[in-house]
Amino acid sequence: MSVIDDESQAWINKSSTDSTGQRFALLLKADAGNQWAIGSRVTVIRKNDRQVHEITAGAGYLSQSTTEIFLVSDSTNPIISLQINWSDGSEQVVPLPKMPSTRLVVNKK
C-alpha cells in the first residue's frame, strides 16, 4: 500500500447476491480432441434472465484462462437450467432442479 498526501477511501465490494446464494463451479468435459470444451458456449437460464459464458483459452501473453465457469444461484433469481452449445455445434440442456454442492462437471453426450 502506498500513501499519498490526500484522503483515500477503502473500496468495499458489495455483492448483489443475497446470503442464501449457492455458489458453484461448472466444468465442461468434451471429446478427446477438445477435452476442455474450448469454444463451447453456456447459456445460464434463470427465473428472470439469461447469462451467456464462453469457454476460452489463452487470455494473454504467457497466460491461460480457466475453463471453469463460476456461477451463483440466489433465491430471488435461481438457475433453472444450463443450455450448452458445444464447439462441434451439438446442443445439450442440463436441468438444475437442485444446485450442486460446489462443483458440477458436465460430460458431453
Image: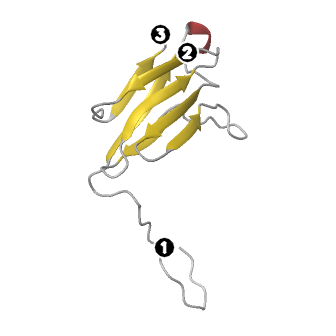
Residue at 55% x, 9% y is: 31
Counting from the top left corner in percent of width and height, residue 104 is at 37, 28
Q: In this view, does 2 lie to the left or right of 94?
A: right
> Mark 3 or mark 1: which comes first in sequence?
1
Answer few, some or many: residues within 10 Å of disc 2's Cα (few below 14, many 20 plus, some between 14 and 19).
few
From the image, state whether disc 2 or disc 3 is nearer to you. 3
Mark 3, secondary structure of its residue: loop
From the image, state whether disc 3 or disc 1 is nearer to you. 3
Q: Which amino acid does label 1 sit on?
A: Trp
Query: Can you identify the residue that label 2 sits on?
Result: 35
Q: In this view, does 101 lie to the left or right of 80?
A: left
Q: In this orientation, which residue lies closer to the viewer: 29 or 94?
A: 94
> What is the C-alpha distance between the residues marked 3 and 1?
45 Å
Residue at 46% x, 37% y is: 45
Q: In this view, does 53 lie above or below 74?
A: above
Query: Can you identify the residue that label 3 sits on?
Result: 109
Query: Can you identify the residue that label 1 sits on?
Result: 11
Q: What residue type is labelled 2?
A: Gln
Counting from the top left corner in percent of width and height, residue 15 is at 41, 61
Q: Which amino acid does label 3 sit on?
A: Lys
Q: In this view, does 95 lie above or below 75?
A: above
